């Protein structure tokens, strides 16, 4: 009978489904563990292992280049020598002074710029905001070279101008104030990025309430506005300070002529001695890593347990304060900053690159066209090492962008979009390089790979892997922001339609997050071109990159070729940024079309 025939079938169908569900659930859990384990293994390879070997290097007494390292030789000798060496304390004090002073100046400039752009009716705010970000893309070594040309006590172009005006006052950027000034003006955009975003998201009703109560606008600024964006100010301050601690280019150019050693230049000097003191360098690098790690921990403690909520459910528009005639004063301040940080250094590099001899007798000689030629550019490109370094840099940039972009997307997706086991550990490990300066990453990779078989050390691959480890926190954060903007219901709709996780990622998530992915990979490419600290210990004669080659030209004493190569590097960066902006806009439009 039909009814009798249908009953057993109806009864057996749920039974099969119920038995299959535990199997699929168990398979899903296994795949989740395998996925998380793969990411943890990759991060261990990139971050934990080199960091552990850095500590081993500081605790041994053998030369890794000649003897390798043996765990039987563990000793605290290197740390005891470091703690007893007054030169280390002097370098630490100089680092704290230079980076602390530079950070204070960066906070003052960045906070002022953020307030001018977001909270006032200053003209040309769009231009100011865009041009103010340009220093982020200037390599620190290039910045140092430009200001050495401008502020050398004997041949500096600024001193030439001051002398022609009949002034006895001279500037000297080969000094602690010179380093503080250059640090401050070039890292102010870090503070601007954090504080401008916070000011845009802050309800202006809080400030209006203060002014209704009779408070002066300046008092409102100091008692209401800045306290409410304190997390952003602290984050920008910490980031600026930590980044400055790991910079080698600026102290090498402006500090060493005046015998001012910072921790970065001191670490490199230890490895340049004969014989190289790799163990002592590792111990100082560990100390630098501990200092930066403590600063990151201190920031979290300061911000924890405090409420800084400024965004509520009610819609609002950021208020633009009417400055009246004073708006032209704020515009003038912005223009002065842009002239100092963008125009002056470029003019200095152009003059040094095209002038046959940098020594300038007077202003008339400065504008004499007979003194200018393409001589330095011809010498630059006649050197085969120049072309080789450009090619190597492009290769490493592509490798870093591809490997780092894929890994960062996988980490960001796992952290923000899944409940995979171990995702908190993945998040923590991927954040560790925030507290490790680039120079320390280079020392860590030196110890990690110099004695292992496989031929990784001395290749472009080790440079790319070091750059990925160095910048993975920045890329993961950028990609995570893009991923969090995608609503979960889009993935759920794909799953309901029968698509698997990988299919959903490739057809839904990745197309929508493509602008962020393109931006993140471009960021990696640009940062790898700029990076000097991590490269200093990992390059070989066959893997010379542009940053190291530029340093070599400078240390060789030829400022003309150095300036010419600096301009080449800046032009390449500008082209990359332009191409990336177009790709990012195209990716954004494609994402909108697909989502529509």
Image: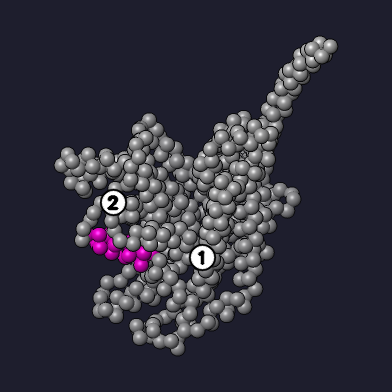
Q: Which disc is residue 320 wearing? A: 2
Q: Please give left or right for residue 173 compared with residue 29 in the image.
A: left
Q: What type of secondary structure mainly makes up the magenta span?
A: helix
Where is residue 194 shown, x and y percent of the image?
A: 40, 47
- Image point (65%, 44%), residue name: 506
SS state under label 2: loop
- Image point (45%, 88%), residue name: 370
Q: For residue 331: magenta?
A: yes
- Image point (43%, 70%), residue name: 346
SS state under label 1: helix
Q: For residue 529: magenta?
A: no
Closer-to-camera residue (260/189): 189
Q: Please give left or right for residue 83 compared with residue 468 in the image.
A: left
- Image point (69%, 25%), residue name: 25
Where is residue 427 shown, x and y percent of the image?
A: 55, 37
Please name which of the two marks, 2 or 1, marks the residue nearer to the observer: 2
Please say whether residue 71 is visible from this viewpoint. no
How crowded pointer 1 is (Cα within 10 Å; few <14, some 14-19, many 20+) is rated as some
Please say whether residue 535 is visible from this viewpoint. yes
Tag 1 residue: 574
Residues at discs 2 and 1 in contact (Cβ within 8 Å): no
Q: Earlier in the sequence, mark 2 or mark 1?
A: 2
Bounds of the magenta segment: 326-341
What is the C-alpha distance between the residues marked 2 and 1?
A: 32 Å
Q: Please give left or right for residue 33 compared with residue 81 in the image.
A: right
Residue 207 lies, with reference to residue 192, above or below; the image says above
């Amino acid at each position: 009978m039909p009814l009798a025939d249908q009953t057993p079938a109806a009864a057996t169908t749920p039974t099969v489904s119920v038995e299959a569900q535990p199997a699929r659930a168990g398979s899903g859990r296994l795949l989740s563990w395998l996925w998380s384990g793969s990411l943890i293994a990759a991060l261990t390879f990139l971050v934990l292992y080199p960091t552990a070997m850095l500590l081993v290097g500081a605790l041994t007494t053998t030369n890794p280049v000649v003897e390798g390292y043996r765990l039987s030789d563990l000793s605290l000798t290197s740390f005891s020598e470091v703690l007893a060496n007054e030169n280390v304390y002097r370098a630490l004090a100089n680092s704290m002074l230079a980076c602390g002073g530079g950070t204070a100046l960066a906070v003052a400039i960045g906070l002022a710029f953020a307030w001018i752009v977001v909270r006032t009716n200053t003209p040309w705010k769009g231009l100011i905001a865009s041009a103010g970000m340009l220093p982020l893309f200037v390599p620190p070594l290039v910045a140092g070279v430009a200001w050495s040309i401008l502020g050398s006590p004997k041949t500096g172009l600024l001193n030439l101008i001051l002398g022609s005006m009949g002034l006895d006052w001279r500037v000297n950027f080969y000094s602690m104030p010179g380093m503080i000034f250059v640090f401050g003006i070039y890292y102010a955009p870090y503070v601007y990025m954090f504080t401008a975003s916070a000011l845009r998201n802050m309800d202006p009703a809080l400030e209006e309430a203060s002014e209704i109560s009779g408070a002066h606008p300046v008092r409102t600024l100091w008692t209401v506005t800045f306290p409410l964006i304190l997390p952003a100010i602290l984050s920008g301050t910490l980031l600026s300070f930590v980044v400055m601690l790991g910079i080698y280019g600026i102290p090498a150019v402006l500090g060493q002529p005046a015998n001012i050693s910072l921790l970065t230049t001191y670490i490199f000097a230890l490895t340049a001695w004969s014989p190289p003191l790799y163990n002592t360098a590792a111990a100082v690098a560990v100390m630098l890593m501990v200092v930066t790690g403590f600063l990151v921990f201190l920031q979290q403690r300061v911000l924890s347990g405090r409420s800084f909520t400024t965004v509520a459910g009610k819609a609002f528009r950021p208020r633009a304060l009417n400055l009246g005639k004073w708006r032209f004063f704020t515009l003038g301040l912005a223009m002065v900053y842009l002239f100092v940080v963008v125009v002056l250094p470029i003019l200095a590099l152009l003059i040094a690159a095209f002038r046959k001899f940098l020594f300038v007798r007077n202003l008339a000689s400065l504008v004499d066209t007979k003194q200018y030629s393409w001589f330095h550019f011809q010498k630059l490109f006649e050197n085969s090492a120049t072309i080789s370094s450009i090619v190597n840099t492009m290769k490493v940039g592509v490798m870093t962008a591809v490997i780092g972009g894929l890994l960062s997307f996988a980490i960001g997706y796992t952290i923000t979009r899944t409940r995979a086991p171990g995702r908190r550990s993945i998040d923590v490990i991927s954040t560790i390089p925030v507290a490790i300066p680039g120079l320390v990453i280079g020392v860590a990779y030196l110890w990690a790979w110099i004695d292992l078989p496989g031929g990784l050390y001395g290749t472009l691959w080790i440079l790319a892997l070091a750059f990925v480890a160095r910048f993975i926190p920045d890329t993961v954060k950028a990609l995570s922001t893009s991923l969090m903007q995608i609503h979960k219901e889009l993935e759920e709709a794909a799953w309901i339609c029968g698509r698997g996780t990988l299919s959903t990622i490739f057809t839904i998530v990745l197309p929508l997050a493509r602008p962020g992915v393109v931006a993140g990979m471009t960021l990696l490419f640009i940062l790898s071109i700029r990076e000097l600290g991590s490269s200093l210990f990992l390059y070989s004669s066959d893997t010379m990159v542009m940053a190291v080659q530029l340093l070599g030209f400078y240390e060789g004493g030829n400022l003309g070729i150095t300036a010419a190569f600096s301009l080449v590097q800046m032009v390449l960066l500008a082209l990359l940024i332009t191409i990336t902006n177009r790709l990012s806009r195209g990716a954004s439009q494609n994402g909108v079309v697909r989502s529509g």
